[in-house]
Amino acid sequence: MTDSQAPARADRRAEIAAGLARVRSRIADACAAAGRDRAEVTMIAVTKTYPASDVVTLVGLGVTDVGENRDQEAATKAAQVAAAGVAPRWHFVGRLQRNKVKSVLRYADVVQSVDSVRLASALDAGVTAIGRDRPLDVLVQVSIDGDAARGGAVPDSADPDAGLGAVTEAVAAAGGLRLAGLMAVAPLGWEPERAFARLAAIAALVRADHPQATELSAGMSGDLEAAIGHGATHVRVGSALLGMRPTLR
């Protein structure tokens, strides 16, 4: 067993448990303020830069969903977690290059960052190529402010590759994919309330054409309350849960 697979020290487990309790309380309070059922919101523990032992600890504390944003780290970590006998639901939440598709498909249950028709097509082909026995759940990433340079399909755009309508239609039509909903990050310089209100309006338009696209992944450690207030079904929490991130090398 490697150090990253080894059970967490008692003090680290207590630290994670305390962070988890605080985040769960914040989610419950936000749901109450919004008049929503707490069961409607799933917390995704974003564990980039943290060891596999933290994932094992989180699952032992009842966390079911884990997010990663870099394949090089995530593929190794997912294998270590599996070797420890633990099986969370893995979400890939970072920008995905098409040459990493087959690797990501070997561990991810959900890809939340599909923002082009080309990427949707590559994922669909990859599902067939690796003989995956179930469709991949996909969230289409939305560029709330229309700046595709930071990632996200662009609403109200006729771009055949990066327009939101084109991407959602491509995912919905792909036999190896299931259009589960949308994902977004509040743009830099935007107040969370403004950003997530805009996202909620976009999501309503998408659901009018694709009623199955009910999931909305929005909100992170600093703005999860605003996201829940505007209908988020998934919040992606890292530092508020696990502490300050280790320095990337």
Image: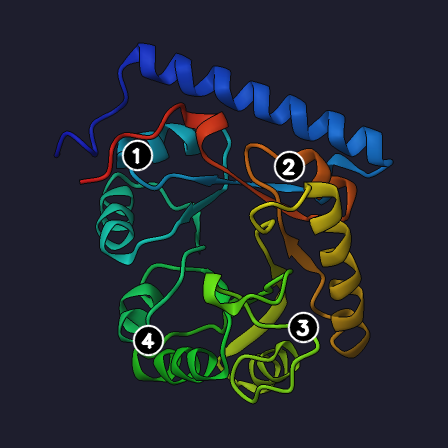
Label 2 to label 3: alpha-carbon separation: 23 Å
Identify residue for label 2: 224
Q: Please name the amino acid that badge 3 sits on.
A: Pro
Work out whether mark 4 precedes mark 2 in sequence or the reverse, and give the earlier one.
4
At horizontal 83% and vertical 30% (from top left) the residue drawn is 33
Which residue is identified by label 1?
50
Outermost residue toward the top? 11
Task: Please state, as top left, top right, bottom left or bottom right, where the N terminus lies in the image.
Answer: top left
Is any atom of residue 195 visible in this view? yes
Spatial CA distance of label 4 from label 1 is 25 Å
Cα separation, mark 3 vs mark 4, equals: 22 Å
Q: CA distance from mark 3 to mark 1?
A: 34 Å
Residue 27 image position (x, y, % from top left)? 67, 30
Residue 230 to residue 97: above or below: above
**Of labels 2 and 3, the one closer to you:** 3
Is the C-beta separation of discs 3 and 4 under 8 Å?
no
Q: Which residue is mark 4?
A: 98
Q: What residue is pinned by disc 3? A: 155
